[in-house]
Amino acid sequence: MVGLFSRMIVGMTIRMPRWFVGWVSRRYVAGPELKDAVKVMHRLSKEGACFTIDVLGEEITSMDEATFFLEEYKRVITAISDNNFDANLSIKPTAFGLLLDPEKGMENIEALVAMANQHEMFVRLDMEDHRVTDDTIQVMLDMHEKGLTNVGVVLQARLFRTLDDIKAIAEKLGPSADYRICKGIYLEPEDISHTDRQPIIDATNSCIDAMLDAGAYVGVASHDHPVIKHTIKSLESRNMGPGKSDPRSNAGPQRPQKGPGYEFQMLLGVRGPLRRKLSAQGHRTRVYIPYGEKWYEYSIRRLKENPTIGTQVAKAFLMPWTNRP
């Protein structure tokens, strides 16, 4: 029944005028320009949050667009440095031309990662749908081979392959492995992924445990209470947590702008009270902040690809006081 209601809300929302979608999305997207993201970071820095910045756009149609994203992300690095924000970057490899011109796309990504490395800034490779899972992981491995270890990847727990990916990456990178684990926004085919809520939660928890056991850095990107509770229990069982040095013998030294082996990550505008509670308990919390001219396309895509967002839309509209950003 909840799923049906959520899909109904999404169906109504994507048919509404652009201004209405903009009204809904302003909670989840900083705005069309970099200055909007800077404004949000100034506000949320007062709550002890750190950030990862995403310039909206993917699957470009020309390499000129790839050049735009490279230059825009360079502006982001400068803005983060100038304002002394505790922030890193999230990028989609396809936005840099990986599918159009793999060689040039890799050059673009390497140029950005190298610039970020000069500023001791981390770069997260966002994971898109299953068509580019192998390519995205390979980009990360190639960067590490070039000595650029300030880059990690997102893995989607709903995919059946993810536990094997964790093992394979751990064998190649050891303690340098750095993940964001999420359930996955893309509704993948049922022959390659979990499609029901509980199996996805169980898979996410299994992935978190595997990453922690491998000595990797783990960014837990979830708003689901069962995943948060499992993570805290898993950390406690490993003597990890707020105010403690990472005790895992197979973990590397703590990096700049990182937590003691883990952190919690949440989308802008989603479950703000939970994020603030975790922060008050001493956990490192990171907010994913998207901005850009393609806010409308981003908003519609997220709604179409994950209709369960509809309940969040309805709650934000009907009871905004229960979910302050």
Image: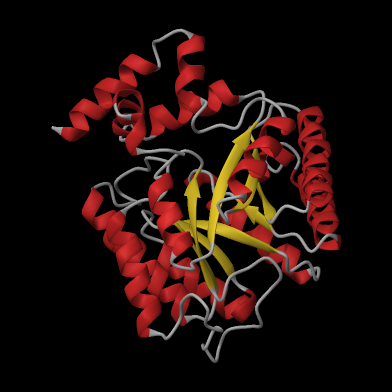
Residue 203, compared with residue 28, is above or below; it is: below
Residue 199 is drawn in which quadrant?
bottom left
Image spot of residue 70 (x, y percent): 80, 40
Q: Is residue 28 left or right of residue 11?
A: right
Residue 310, compared with residue 191, is above or below; it is: above
Colour pattern: secondary structure
Work out whether residue 176 or residue 314 is closer to the camera in this orientation and state it: 314
What residue appears at the point 81 percent right and 68 percent down from the top-left corner? Answer: 146
Q: Is residue 239 left or right of residue 6?
A: right
Work out whether residue 183 or residue 269 is closer to the camera in this orientation and state it: 269
Residue 37 is drawn in which quadrant?
top right
What residue appears at the point 53 percent right and 81 percent down from the top-left corner? Answer: 215
**Quadrant that contains the N terminus:** top left
Image spot of residue 120 (x, y percent): 79, 64
The number of callouts visible is 0
What residue appears at the point 38 percent right and 52 percent down from the top-left corner? Answer: 274
* Residue 126 appears in view: yes
Image spot of residue 145 (x, y percent): 76, 71
* Residue 222 appears in view: no
Work out whether residue 254 or residue 82 is closer to the camera in this orientation and state it: 82
Image spot of residue 294 (x, y percent): 62, 24
